[in-house]
Image (tube, rainbow, N blue to C red):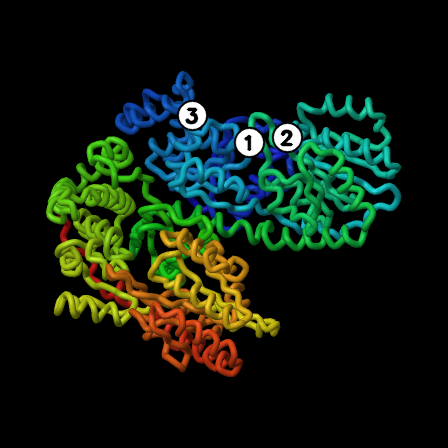
Amino acid sequence: MNGAAPILVLVKRFPKLSETFILNEILSLEAAGLDLEVRTLFAPSDEFSHPDAARVRANIGELKPGSIRASFSRAPLATLRALAASVLAAGAGAPALMREAIGLADDANATRAKLIYAHFIDHPATIARIAAILADAPFAISAHAKDIYTTPRRLLAANLKAAAFTTTCSDCNAAHLSAIAPGANVVRHYHGFDPDLFAAETAPRESGAPLILSVGRLRNKKGHDTLIEACAALRQRGVVFRCQIVGYGPEEARLKAMIAVRGLDAEISLLGKLPHAEIVPLMAGASVFALPCRIDEDGDRDGVPNVILEAMASGLPVVATDVSGVPEAVRHEMTGLLVKPDDSAALANAIARIFADPRASAQMGQRGRELVRAQFSRDVAAPPLIADLRAHSKRGPVEVAYIVKGFPRLSESFITNEILILEGNGLPMRIFALKPGERIARNVIANMRTPLDTLPCLTSLSDTKLSKWLLENVSQFSVPLARLILKRPRALLRTAAEAIAMMRRYRGANGAPRKVFIKEFLQAAYIADALIAAGGARHLHGHFCHGATTVTSFVSRITGIPFSFTAHAKDIYQAELNPGDLLTRKLDAARFVVTCTDANCRHLVHQFGALAAHRVRTIYHGLDISRFHPRPTPANDGAVRVLSVGRHVEKKGFATLIRACDLLRRQGLAITCEIVGEAGEETASLEGLIATLGLGDLVRLTPPEPQTALAETYARATIFALPCVILDNGDRDGIPNVLAEAMATGLPIVTTPVSGIPEIVEDGINGIFVPPNDEAALAEAIKRVAADSELRARLGESARRTIIEKFDSSKTTMELQKLFAAAPERVAAE
């Protein structure tokens, strides 16, 4: 150890043979240089342990309950809050829970831990949540399987919402937890292990009767009774085999009785609990690994069983059931075979298939080993978790605090790219998201080191009286407000008064006060408190010049930290988003303002004169050009594949594109069109238009895709079309990021010369312009480009060159970093 441990880990028992994933994780964290202290609720119960347990460097000790009286004498307010949380969580069991939490908080303070990390979301996470109140430290959760599905939803939601983040071991689990607490920061990190310990070539498969191997605790959810029934069916068919089941547990007596009743003693052996070193050669000598898991009546189930991954690493084909997270590892017909739970006949058929086709079985085993190395090896699975733990255990001063509406979002990948490049340039940052981001976009930030704080989830304010809304939501901000009253009383009260004045000054269209400013004040108080507690920041930066920048300006008022913001498109042109002189006030208060097109800059200078001319700078949203490469030549099958990407909103012009496709079909052009994007207010209208025109077999609306998948979608296309328009209310795009992505892949572009698009597309040079809302011109342009392969190649080559020269994010983001560096360090708090 090298001094104070920044992470205090709480587990039920450690080490434990059936929880080698925790051991593997701790070894990975220590190998990455993290200092750990481990506390257990119970002493180890296994008669022997995993050999790697001796490699753990952390100090391991059993948690000792603390004194409620002593805690109250040290910190009466925190103790009262913790006691209230304990009563809500445990009822009559609150005193025992409270003493455990005090003991953990005492350990956190004694070791100066900066993060408490609890394995299992039931009792350990509840202890950690209450200890975090007492220690004034963040906590995180690792949720697994039974703990997720057998814990009351109320307790799950409380733990999830309070945690800095919750990691779980499967996408299935992550989706379930996110549905319980939509605002919670839930991430999926697979359990990593060392696949080289299970080298497929360590021993040849034994000759003679093929071996079916199963490993796992003898519990109902493992489905070993189904495996025994399948073995009976195999023997009845005359299939020769042996079956060995490794494990121990409450089902042992019942399983022995089943084996005896069916006369399978010669074929099936229950080997009991074995050391890990003895399981490795069993896997090396087996022909198939079988684990027919099921979901118990109480909801208990597996995640992605570690033994399945170990079998795959051994090169074994796996036969399992399609429950919980199992299909994330066992890909049907690829790395193994999946059957329905409790279907012994199907299980017998699948095992017989493995025996009957050694070549196909070996291929499944090889693909399984490759999949494990690519997704579940320690080297791949550990870094994202390590990054999250590091990020949330580092709550010190930062250079720049970003405030965004939601993060991450696929439609705002330009913000993600910007943050990742600034991080890569060594800029210490912290991100505050007013709302949770999109699950589909999380993979992009899997290795991001910058801490991400998602603010508490709030109920809708639109159709609710302010008094009722405050009763429902203000409790989530009571602690930050109380701390700010003590630390920044004048600044907080003046900012609150300003929010109330703005509510009245900028009334809505019906004359009613704009309640949203009160919500934004509370969000600002939450952020200000977090920054002050961590030592502050040098600068604040908001994205989008309406809500997020209002919050940013309030944070600046409370803390005295200067701010800037980036203005994009809709937020600039729709006056109701910044009513009256609100945008003027923001421009005047900001140290600088960035916008993403010269068109936006000219508009702001025209509207605000010298103030904007002095403050506003154009910095293009860059693109990570390493993610988007020139595409291979598409298949020459005569089909024209038109691609468009964007949210289903009117300003994208998708209705014009659909009508253009109808014209092209009538002209006999073999065309397909795919519109990739998030559903929006135009989705129903677009679906209706496709149906009315009878284009269901030619035009598809497909869901949004992460950038990695989108790059492949661009590669399959012939032409990229985006016929944007400016709406009557002024809403428009700036320079659509998807346009830059398509150009980076070398796709020929057909689009409209609106807003900032002429700054990236030159008509006839790297794309083709058509007038907005003109389906005939759009159809003619698509037809022209489709018919001329030389034109497509020339436009595509020029398009990629444009991106490399003008829109490489490694260059554009550096301009923003220079502005951050030049900004003054502090203004006076009000």
- Residue at position x 14%, y 65% in the image: 608
Q: Where residue 17 sits in the image (x, y, percent)?
A: 63, 34
Nearer to the camera, 192 or 371? 371
Closer to the chain start, of discs 3 and 2, is: 3
Is residue 789 placed above or below 461 in the rendered structure?
below
Left or right of residue 97: residue 555: left
Residue labelled with disc 2: 221
Give left or right: position of 375 versus 402: right
Residue 41 image position (x, y, % from top left)? 50, 27
Residue at x 53%, y 68% (from the top left corner): 671
Q: CA distance from mark 3 to mark 2?
A: 31 Å
The answer to whether the residues at label 1 and label 2 have Cβ atoms under 8 Å apart is yes
The kind of residue tagged 1 is Lys
Amino acid type of the residue tagged 3 in the rendering: Glu
**Does label 1 or label 2 sit earlier along the sequence?**
1
Which numbered tag is attached to residue 28? none
Of the pair 208 and 807, the residue shown nearer to us: 807
User: For residue 617, what is the image quadrant?
Assistant: bottom left
User: What residue sits 81% from the left and 50% below the top?
Assistant: 357
Residue in the foreground of this view, choosing between 405 and 788: 788
Q: Which residue is mark 1?
A: 146
Q: Which residue is mark 3?
A: 100
